[in-house]
Image: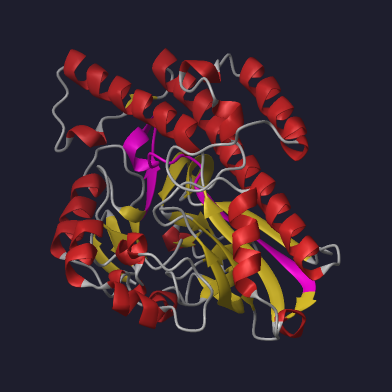
Amino acid sequence: MERLSTRLLSWASMIDEKTLDQAYTTARMPFIHPHLALMPDAHLGKGATVGSVIPTLGAIIPAAVGVDIGCGMIAVRTQFTKRDLDGRDLAELREQIERAIPLSAGRYNNKIVTTAEPRIAELEALAEKSELDPETYAENWRLQLGTLGSGNHFIEVSVDELDRVWLFLHSGSRGVGNRIAGYHISVAQRLAKQWWIELPDPDLAYLVEGTPEFTRYIRELRWAQHFALLNREEMMDRVARQVSEFLGTPVDEQERINCHHNFTESEKHYGKRVWVSRKGAIQADAGRPGLIPGSMGTASYVVEGLGDPQSLNSSPHGAGREYSRSAARRTFSHEQLREAMTGIEFRDTSAFIDEIPQAYKPIDRVMADAASLVSIRHTLRQLVNVKGD
């Protein structure tokens, strides 16, 4: 860990100047307490750096939570081993998963499936309690539950160091969460202009605790966080069903972990109650299980938090981009993607060039930087990868 200033601590051994400048700017906001913690996977984001932990007194910066509210990971350890998959056509399993779960931006379910019904009812009840009408943000929000999205969202079938089969996926609150985030970012920006508040970046506009705008944001934020969690649960149930059908044996879950990495919680740190916004970071209290994926084609990790107080009990959420999407497309080729994915069943398309492993920081370097934040319980190697365009 390196103390860059009284309000900025960094665990990142690989970081560019633009990202550092953005982190310094956020750390100078007057309500940061006690400091911003920059994770090993930090890279440039909207307003605030992706891979940062931002504790605030009496205010929240909506853009510092992330536009995909509640985005995170879920993993299930099954009773199967690699031997159960050996000799089988893994392309068939990938295609079954792709048929069961809508992929890509803007693609949703055609109907509400049976497994989604109780989760939708739970979200409807929470929305009523929160005085929220999700249809004002997305009329089809119910059909969004159980859908993956695109970009760095994925579904994987992996094996650990003991060759045990894990099911692993990454997604968030989809279109409805994105619109909730966008609305509250715009509200914060409007209030800043109304009150003549000068900001170093318009995306650092904030909502003040005790105001109606803040109260509404927290209610809707928590609904979107719960939507994201249930969205992952719904997809995982479908993946497990497809694996069960493929192998002819029901999945027996040995372990399930579900964790956010774009969220806000009220926590006590350094003697004060603060709002901790983890934008591309997971909660890593001592003993808490967590998930840190690598990039497409590299290892992922099941971890346990070490409760480092200086990190505000946090850790990185993944590899972190080294190249922007456009830069990755200019730099790498379809053939390089194929080479990086050797031995992994995936949909072979140039649409995934911007997700090539070389576009990300080396996950082993990130995990070495995070050695004081988490301990590694399991290392997962991908066998099957599913992504949306």
Task: Report the number of discs.
Answer: 0
Q: Residue at x 25, y 17 (%)?
A: 191
Q: Position of residue 205 (x, y in %)?
A: 26, 30
Quarter of image, res 286: bottom right
Its colouring scheme is secondary structure
On screen, 78 above or below 160?
A: above
Q: Residue at x 65, y 31 (%)?
A: 111
Q: Residue at x 61, y 51 (%)?
A: 99
Q: Position of residue 40 (x, y in %)?
A: 36, 68
Q: Nearer the viewer, residue 123 or 188?
A: 123
Q: Position of residue 247 (x, y in %)?
A: 79, 70
| Highlighted magenta segment, given as a residue range | 52-79
On screen, 44 above or below 162?
A: above
Q: Residue at x 73, y 64 (%)?
A: 243
Q: Position of residue 138 (x, y in %)?
A: 48, 23
* Visible residue check, residue 318: yes
Q: Is 383 one of the magenta-colored residues?
A: no
Relative horizontal placement of residue 104, taking residue 28 as reference (left or right): right
Q: Nearer the viewer, residue 272 or 96?
A: 96
Q: Quadrant of the N terminus?
A: bottom left
Quarter of image, res 276: top left
Q: Is 56 one of the magenta-colored residues?
A: yes
On screen, 192 above or below 31?
A: above
